[in-house]
Image (tube, grey):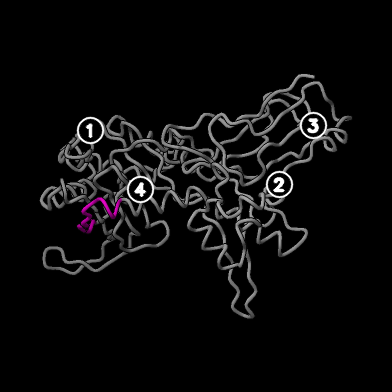
C-alpha cells in the first residue's frame, strides 16, 4: 500500500486560513493524477487542489465547509488500490460530516463560538452541545450552526447540499446564507478604509467625443493588428497614469506617520465576478501600450469569471479604477482600497446638453469621481489630478505626446 496525502496548497502570508468548498470525489472513488479533488476558498481567490497520485480516495479528513490551514492534510489516496476496491475502501473509511461529530456534553458549556454563530444559535434555539465546531480549537462558526439547523430541519439535508437556512414565514419567507470568505473580506476592508482614511470625493465631467471618434476610426484596424478589441478602459487607465505622474501623491500610500511615494504605477481594475468584487492589478502601466492594457483587462475578466485569478494577480496596487458605468451608474463616491490613497470612479457616458462658445450643444458626457485620503492629499492635488485626467481624455494626443 502506498498512501499519498492530499494537502492544502501554500497560502500567502496575509491569508491565515481557508474554507473547503465541495469535494468532487467521495471516499472509495477512483482518481487520476492531477484530477481536481476540491476547491479551497480564501479571502482573495479560489484554489484548486489536484490529486497527487492516481489511485483511490481512501480518507476525507476535513468535510465540505471545513476551515483549514496551509499545508494541512485533508485527505489520503491509496495509489495501489483500483476501482475494484472502491466499495471496500468506502466501507472501511466513511466520509466524515461536521454535523455528525459529537461534542462531549461536559465540554458543551465551554465551547467557544463566533459572535455571529452565537447570535444564530440563539435565534434558532440551538445549544452549543448540538453543534460541532469546525473552526480552530473547535470554535463554532456561523457555517457550523447553519449546518446543524439544516440537518435538524430535514433528515436528508447535508452541509454540502444545504448551505443556507430557509425559514417559511407565510408569504414573507427569509433565507439566511453565510458570507463567502471573499465577501467577508470585502466588508472588512471597506469598513477599515472608511474608519482609517479621511475620504473626500471630487467630481468633474468629461466630453468623451474625442475618444469615441478615435476609437470608431481605429477599432477595426486595432483588432486586426493587435488581436484585441479597443475599449474605453485603456484610455481611462492611460489618462489616470498621466495624472499620477504629474501628481505623485495620488499614487502614494500611508504607513504610520510616513508617506510612501511609489516610483511605479500598478493600477487595480475593479472587476465583478460570480464570487463578488475583485481587483486584479495592471503592473507598470506606464510601460504598457493601449493594446497591452486591453489584452490584460480581457484576460483578467475571463479569469475572474472562471475563478482562476491567482494571489499574484490580486496583490499590491498603488491606485484603483472602478467602472460602475458598465452597470449603468451615473455617479458614485468610490471607497479607497487600502493601503492606497486614491481611487477613480468612472460612469456611463450619456448625451447631455452642454454650453460651448455660448451655444447649447449635445455631447457624450462621462462624470468622473476621484475619492482621496485627505490626510495626505489636499484638495488642490486631487482637483488638479482629476483635471489632468479630463484634459487627457478630451485631447487624447496628450497621452501620445506626454503633455
Which residue appears at 45% of the width and 36% of the height? 224
Pointers 4 and 1 in contact (C-beta within 8 Å)? no
| Image x and y of residue 242, in percent | 21, 39
Q: Is residue 114 magenta?
A: no
Instruction: Verify CB contact (< 8 Å) between mark 2 and mark 4.
Output: no
Real-space CA distance between mark 4 and mark 1, rounded to the nearest whole angstrom: 26 Å
Q: Which residue is mark 1?
A: 262
Q: Earlier in the sequence, mark 3 or mark 4?
A: 3
Rate crowding at label 1 as few (under 14), some (14 to 19) or many (20 or more) other CA atoms within 10 Å. Answer: some
Disc on the earlier residue, 3 or 2:
3
In this rendered view, identify the residue nearer to me: 35 or 93.
Answer: 93
Disc 2 packing (10 Å; few <14; some 14–19; many ≥20): some
The residue at which mark 4 appears reads as 232
Q: Where is mark 3, residue-wise?
A: 30
Q: Is residue 372 above or below residue 256?
A: below
**Left or right: 53, with 92 as reference point:** left
- Quadrant housing residue 32: top right
Identify the magenta region.
Answer: 193-206
Task: Tell me residue 212's x, y (percent).
Answer: 32, 51
Instruction: Residue 97: give its label.
Output: 2
Q: Quadrant of the N terminus?
A: top right
Which quadrant: the C terminus? top left
Q: Secondary structure at mark 3?
A: strand
Residue at mark 3 to residue at mark 2: CA–CA distance:
21 Å
Nearer to us in this view, 94 or 112: 112
Amino acid at each position: 500500500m502506498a498512501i499519498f496525502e492530499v494537502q492544502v496548497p501554500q497560502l500567502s502570508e496575509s491569508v491565515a486560513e481557508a474554507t473547503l468548498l465541495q469535494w468532487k470525489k467521495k471516499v472509495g472513488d477512483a482518481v487520476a493524477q492531477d484530477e481536481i479533488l476540491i476547491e479551497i476558498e480564501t479571502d482573495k481567490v479560489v484554489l484548486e487542489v489536484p490529486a497527487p497520485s492516481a489511485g483511490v480516495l481512501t480518507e476525507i479528513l476535513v468535510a465540505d465547509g471545513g476551515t483549514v490551514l496551509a499545508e494541512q492534510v485533508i485527505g489520503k489516496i491509496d495509489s495501489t488500490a483500483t476501482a475494484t476496491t472502491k466499495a471496500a475502501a468506502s466501507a472501511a473509511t466513511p466520509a466524515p460530516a461536521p454535523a455528525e461529530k459529537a461534542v462531549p456534553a461536559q465540554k458543551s458549556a465551554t465551547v467557544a463560538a463566533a459572535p455571529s454563530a452565537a447570535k444564530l444559535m440563539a435565534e434558532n434555539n440551538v445549544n452549543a452541545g448540538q453543534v460541532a465546531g469546525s473552526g480552530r480549537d473547535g470554535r463554532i462558526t456561523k457555517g457550523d450552526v447553519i449546518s446543524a439547523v439544516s440537518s435538524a430541519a430535514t433528515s436528508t439535508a447535508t452541509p454540502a447540499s444545504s448551505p443556507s437556512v430557509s425559514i417559511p414565514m407565510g408569504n414573507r419567507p427569509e433565507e439566511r446564507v453565510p458570507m463567502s470568505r471573499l465577501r467577508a473580506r470585502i466588508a472588512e476592508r471597506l469598513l477599515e478604509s472608511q474608519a482609517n482614511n479621511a475620504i473626500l470625493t471630487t467630481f468633474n465631467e468629461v466630453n468623451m467625443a474625442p475618444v469615441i471618434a478615435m476609437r470608431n476610426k481605429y477599432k477595426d484596424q486595432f483588432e486586426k493588428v493587435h488581436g484585441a478589441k479597443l475599449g474605453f478602459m485603456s484610455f481611462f487607465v492611460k489618462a489616470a497614469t498621466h495624472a499620477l505622474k504629474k501628481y505623485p501623491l495620488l499614487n502614494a500610500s500611508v504607513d504610520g506617520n510616513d508617506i510612501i511615494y511609489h516610483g511605479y504605477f500598478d493600477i487595480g481594475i475593479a472587476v465583478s465576478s460570480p464570487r463578488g468584487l475583485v481587483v486584479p492589478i495592471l503592473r507598470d502601466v506606464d510601460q504598457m501600450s493601449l493594446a497591452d492594457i486591453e489584452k490584460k483587462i480581457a484576460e483578467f475578466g475571463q479569469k475572474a469569471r472562471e475563478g482562476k485569478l491567482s494571489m499574484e494577480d490580486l496583490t499590491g496596487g498603488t491606485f484603483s479604477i472602478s467602472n460602475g458605468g458598465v452597470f449603468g451608474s451615473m455617479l458614485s463616491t468610490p471607497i479607497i482600497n487600502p493601503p492606497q490613497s486614491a481611487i477613480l470612479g468612472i460612469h456611463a457616458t450619456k448625451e447631455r446638453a452642454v454650453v460651448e462658445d455660448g451655444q447649447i450643444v449635445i455631447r457624450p458626457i462621462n462624470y468622473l469621481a476621484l475619492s482621496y485620503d485627505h490626510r495626505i492629499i489636499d484638495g488642490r492635488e486631487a482637483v488638479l489630478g482629476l483635471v489632468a485626467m479630463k484634459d487627457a481624455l478630451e485631447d487624447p494626443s496628450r497621452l501620445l505626446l506626454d503633455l
